[in-house]
Image (cartoon, helix red, strand yellow):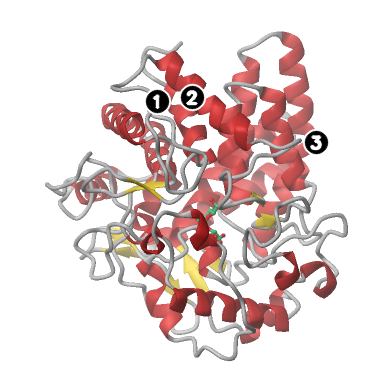
Amino acid sequence: MKEASSQGGAHGEISGGQPPESTANSLAAGVLRRNGLKSWTRPAPTLYPHQWSWDSAFIALGLAHTDNSRAARELESLFSSQWSTGKVPHIVFNPEAPPRSYFPDAERWNSSALSPHAPDSRHTSGLCQPPVHAIAVNRIWETSREQDESRASRAREFLRDNFPRLLNWHRYLATARDPEESGLVTIYHPWESGTDNSPRWDGPLEAVPVGEVPSYTRYDLQHVADASHRPTDAEYDRFLWLLELLKQTRYEEAEIYESHPFLVKDVFFSAILVAANEALLEIAEAVDAPDEDREQIQTWINRGRGGLDGCWDQEFGLCLDRNVRTGEASRARTIAGFAPLISGGLGRNQMDELLQTLDSPAFAGHPELRWPLPPSTSPEDPGFHPRSYWRGPTWPVVNWLLWWSLLRAGETERAERLRRDTLDQLAEGGFAEYFEPFTGEPLGSGEQSWTAAVALDLLASGPDEP
Ligand code: 2M8
């Protein structure tokens, strides 16, 4: 496995060929250590100097294999900035980040001043991201249980403390973000999806007339080798305009629902919520939560699966997002379409159809791919771009989600192939943020924490592992 340089865009090699797993483990653990601050971990050394919500969840999942208490602290630190509405903010700002290192900064979001629901203690963004957290908490529980009784009892304590926070977070998503009770989560900004410039958002974004955006300087471009890896300036203008509109509502959910021009039912986010609710049900079991909480979680799971069923597109063999404003489906072929695989509970026919799409030339079966790993956007989609962020590159963190979902669905052989191919890609390209799908070139930031974190989980979960 290669180790990428800590400078964005550079990916230096420290050893050739695929190393033994113990070396790979220590390289991955080293990335998390170097990106680690006192109680949480930066997603990348320079490009992302603050705490990001779903990055932290993946990081905790990886840390669960090396240091349970550090993993627990990672999530506790994130949840200490949870809003009173239950929302877990997508960014918690680091007051010690170097000046002019990331934009939009805390000042631009201004959430503590604008919203009475934002925490006083730390500045945060006003958005949220996919809820991987309960899945990570469950991993901490699983890995602690395998150890001595004192660790298991500390983990049980951690579960007890965090169950109410997770439940509030999921309740926020099931209510404020789904007033229609459709089972699908509404997002207010492409940043909430985590797949920022995906062609999924092209249609809904085009419908947003862009107003006067207060002047700004992008700092992200100074941390990558080439601007083509990142979203375009035109995309940034739209992202920042949406932020201005959200500020005008003071981040009030009801007002946003009333006036905001970008309201989309995100199938990928919704599917992760279903899987996270399954994890939460297991946590509820472990902490002996009241029956009504468990029933509530089960209702959300059923509702989520029902909602996703309604978004199935026969022609693409994928699930599609829906614009709440127009009712139209986003006809883009992206990895988000595999949402039902993540939410689980599929019948044999739908599973076969999804796997057929996954294996087809539209995704992992494309004959020119460096590894048979699904690009974030299908090479057959008009919005595909092999180097541009979420428009085509392969993301290890997405491979992890698909691998984990395949395992849960009992597709063990296929899951194992995906695990091996993902690790081979990292062995050649290092712990990059994302990869060019045809050449395997590492792109974006080097030393990306969640890439290292999922590598640790994949390495620990091989068929030879106990
Ligand atoms: C990317 O998003 C941020 C904005 O939130 C950015 O581009 O500046 C996305 O890949 C997102 O999913 C991820 O959580 C974040 C940090 O890794 O970077």
Separation of marks 2 and 3 at Cα, in angstroms: 32 Å
Q: Earlier in the sequence, mark 2 or mark 1?
A: 1
Q: Residues within 10 Å of mark 3 (few under 14, many from 20)?
A: few
Q: Amino acid at mark 2?
A: Leu
State the mark number for residue 161.
3
Residue 60 seen:
no
> Front-most of 339 and 106?
106
State the mark number for residue 110.
none
Q: Earlier in the sequence, mark 1 or mark 3?
A: 1
Q: Secondary structure at mark 1?
A: loop
Q: Amino acid at mark 1?
A: Ile
Q: Where in the figure is residue 150, as x and y percent of width and height?
A: 77, 12
Separation of marks 1 and 3 at Cα, in angstroms: 42 Å
Q: Residues within 10 Å of mark 2 (few under 14, many from 20)?
A: many
Callouts 2 and 1 close, C-beta under 8 Å: yes
Q: Amino acid at mark 3?
A: Asp
State the mark number for residue 27.
2
Residue visible at 36% across and 45% down in the picture: 346
Residue visible at 58% across and 44% down in the picture: 45
Q: Residues within 10 Å of mark 1 (few under 14, many from 20)?
A: few
Callouts 2 and 3 close, C-beta under 8 Å: no
State the mark number for residue 14.
1
